[in-house]
Image (tube, helix red, strand yellow):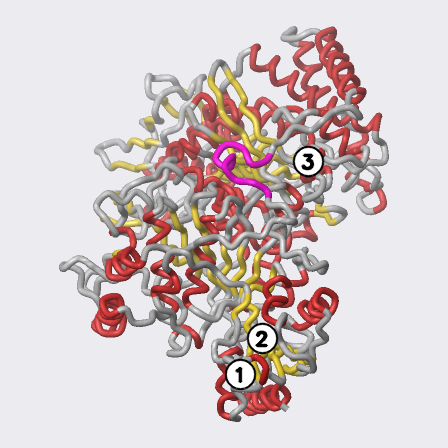
Amino acid sequence: MLRYFRYGPSKWRTYSQSMKINQCLNSFSEYDKIRLISSSPKRSLYCNFSNNNSFQAAGLSLQQFDDAQSQGIARLIEAYRVHGHKKADVNPLYKTSQKSDVEELRPENYGLDMNSNITLNGGTTISISDLISHLEHVFCGSISVETSQLEFSDEKEFICQSINQARYEEIDDKKKRNLAELLIKSQGIDHFINSKFKTVKRYGGEGAESAAAFSDEIFRFAAKDEIEQVIIGMPHRGRLNLLVGQLDLPPEVLFRKMKGLTEFPEEASSYSTGDVISHLTSSTDLVYDDNTVHVTMLPCPSHLEAVNSVAMGKCRGRQLTQTLGKHSTDEFPIDEKKALCFLMHGDAAFAGQGVVAECFNMSNLPHFSVGGTIHLIVNNQIGFTTPSHQGRSSRYSSDIGKIIGCPVIHVNGDHPEDVVKVANIAMEYRKKFKKDIIVDLICFRRWGHNEIDDPSFTQPIMYQEIEARHSVPDYYAQKLVESEVISSEEVSQWNEELQSKFNEHLKNTDSYIPPRTFLHEQWSSMKIPQSSEYTLWDTGYPVDNLAYIGVKSVEVPDSLEMHSRLVKMYADVRRNKMETGSPVDWATAEALAFGSLLQQDFSIRLCGQDVGRGTFSHRHAVVVCQDSEIIHVPLNHLSENQTSQIEVVNSLLSEEAVLGFEYGMSVENPNRLVIWEAQFGDFFNGAQIIVDTFVNSGEAKWLTQSGLVMLLPHGYDGMGPEHSSCRIERFLQGTNSKEDGIDGDDVNIHFCNPTTPAQYFHLLRRQMIRNYRKPLVVASPKTLLRLPAATSCLSEMGPGTHFRPVLPDPSIKDQSKLQKVIFCSGKHYYTLVEERDRLGLSATIAVIRVEELCPFPAHDIRQQVANLPDGISYKWAQEEPRNMGAWNFVSARFENILGIKLEYAGRPVLPTPAVGVGKVHKEQADQILIDTFK
């Protein structure tokens, strides 16, 4: 039978299997590579496992048994492969409760005679009990594996064969020596910090020192395999050990933080808040046997697992960095050798945080795949004070990975040599299959959640056992001393050297000047803007070029059958506007911004739910052939020699993981415009963690610049609480926009609520034209997308033009007649102007638009009111409730900076962004206009 299966990003496999066994057919997994082949008068069983002892042959030849016994042995082997982990010796704690009887592993269940013999290929005869001993050793030892969730037999066989080999493989003495020194060093770092800084929370790696062995082997393998960079995302536990012990973080930086000093040089003190000790980061070159790999640990927030998708995004950004050429499909190629994503997790967070499942869901999707991620769960079997049986509903914390058929290897942290072997298996699997793999390192936590905490309050039995144990480094070193691989004098010397070295670093701490670790490599052309700087960047583009881009943006091959409605309402209309010079709409201005940036060799990534078409069916950046569903991206075909592309990504239904991924892409390369669009503006709150801990604060905490653009459709049009507001107030509350009248560029984000396509065009281009990067949040339109009044001429985007933070009222010719000025932001402007004109008040009331709320454009507003007559009244009008929108942000600044006390006209205070009753919505909208013009 022939079957097709989805495999990885847009790949398909063909799988063929023929079995001629009657009753036992249903006893085997359909994808299992164990093959029963009919022959007469004998049957041969090929189980494809070997070892360095009696099982070196490729299989077992059953020469003396009838069909039922052959089938029984095959089923027993399969049972150990599937259920052996239930009996495995992988938990360093609670030894007496392990090795329990597992129903599926009882040989009598398979009708086997324990006194019978099996003849191996080559003629050697063994008993079934010897076979069981072998299976116990391979699948129930200090390494165990789960493969039943794997969809393809070759992956299952690879894992099982690798585990089999690892269980009989011996590592050489040189490697054992290096491993012992590494573990002693990791432990010594914790001991030194504890002796010098007893009251500092360090979240040490004690009890999980074998994690250092795992990461070291990952780096070593990557270097040997010529992987250019390893990108690490990890939480706090053991972070300092890894940073100082393996990633070359100067110990002085660590000690400075412990003394309450900054991790950055003095020049950065005015624009950096810094971060806590357990969020420190490093980037360095590691050399293994003349092979070099660059390793970068990403900064992280305290929100566990939030960094996962950021690391994935940065990894893919690096893998795409040198990708050139045109792409007509929906898939961009990546080079897995350019970067490896290595994620470390805590067991409780891995099982408990929803972003983990989101990341697994996108791991094999086109536009999100990174060629496989190595996952290490540092499983200390407790979350703060919550035991594992209260922290998850599944058997293992790793079970969430099974949703994508991810292999899981469990390994006992008391066996560092096995940990090293498993690291190699994980890397080989990723190299061969380009998919994620999970290693569950089962260990323990020597102290409480932090070293000041007393864990015996809540886990007395666990910590009685932990206190009675030797440390893993000491135990392993003693084992090597007894086998004469190392001497006890060497162990003492390692400890003494580390303590002496760290004492010297500690002495140098106060005089140490931290290095400048930001805006390096591809970011070296960027600068940090100062508070006194404010520039109107010339973001205009030649009009002839814009007209050309507009035509090309709707051009498709003759062979592509475009939807008939798109031909009339999209392609023909846009071409006609370019030819006649008619004003253009929002989507056209966006396409012109994209195309002009592509012509200037900036790449673009536009991501979000349904962004190819656009939530409101306005964009159509991707055209789908109606006959074949072949995808065509017109902007990737502007010219024959085009080298930069736009990657249009219809994302999975996720906010947190996807926004984190896009943030990661944005911090990798300053020459890539990365845009995330929410389906509705309200939906960004599913990614509030990413907004708060990365987008809003990443530069202040870590001096990491990001040019990420967030498009959040916003506007009150009767769609109810969850389809109206992008929560402007939340973003403004999280800014550091000054209240002293300085319109500087040193704010953390730019927040804009533009009202014309030209303004939007300039915002997008400004993101790339500036010599620094800042996140841009746009309250993007819904009704304005097709509003005839909300259009712009190409001349408004031509050379010498730029984004204008404040737009004056174009209808006011004589300011001396003005009696009232209404300030507003966003689409509400058009409603106000329409009502004002209806009332016949266009000569006495001006409506001024504040297009950029952050940084607050005090200078531009001051210019607008400088020559107004005395006695004018000022109002702020908004659609949002009084406790939301821009009111609380702008009112204080108008009064404190400009001396203007505003009156308020808008919805009353509400607990929800909008009402869900159409009649009430209409009454509120009418009342806003009454309050504005009374």
Q: Is residue 149 shown above or below 245?
A: below
Secondary structure of residue under mark 3: helix
- Mark 1: few, some, or many residues within 10 Å (few <14, many ≥20)? many
Task: Please provide the residue range marked out in magenta.
Answer: 518-528
Residue 697, horizontal then vertical, whole percent: 64, 50
**Quadrant position of residue 204:** top right
Residue ID at (59%, 15%): 176
Q: Which mark is residue 824?
A: 2
Is residue 578 left or right of 588 when viewed as pictured? Answer: left
Helix, strand or loop at disc 2?
Answer: strand
Q: How many marks?
A: 3
**Vertical arrangement, residue 572 with respect to residue 428, above or below:** below
Q: Earlier in the sequence, mark 3 or mark 1?
A: 3
Mark closest to the chain's N terminus, 2 or 3:
3
| Residue type for callout 3 | Glu
Whether residue 95 is visible: no
Residue 877 part of the magenta-drawn span:
no
Q: Residue at x 40, y 31 (%)?
A: 337
656, 866: nearer the viewer = 866
Magenta: main secondary structure equals loop
Percent across and percent down for residue 522 are 48, 35
What is the three-letter code of the residue carrying label 1?
Leu
Q: CA distance from mark 2 to mark 3?
A: 39 Å
Asked if the residues shown at circle 2 and circle 1 are in contact, with their CB atoms under 8 angstroms apart, the answer is yes
Tag on residue 267?
Answer: 3
Query: Tag 2: residue type?
Result: Cys
Res. 832 mark: 1
Quadrant assignment, res 641: top left
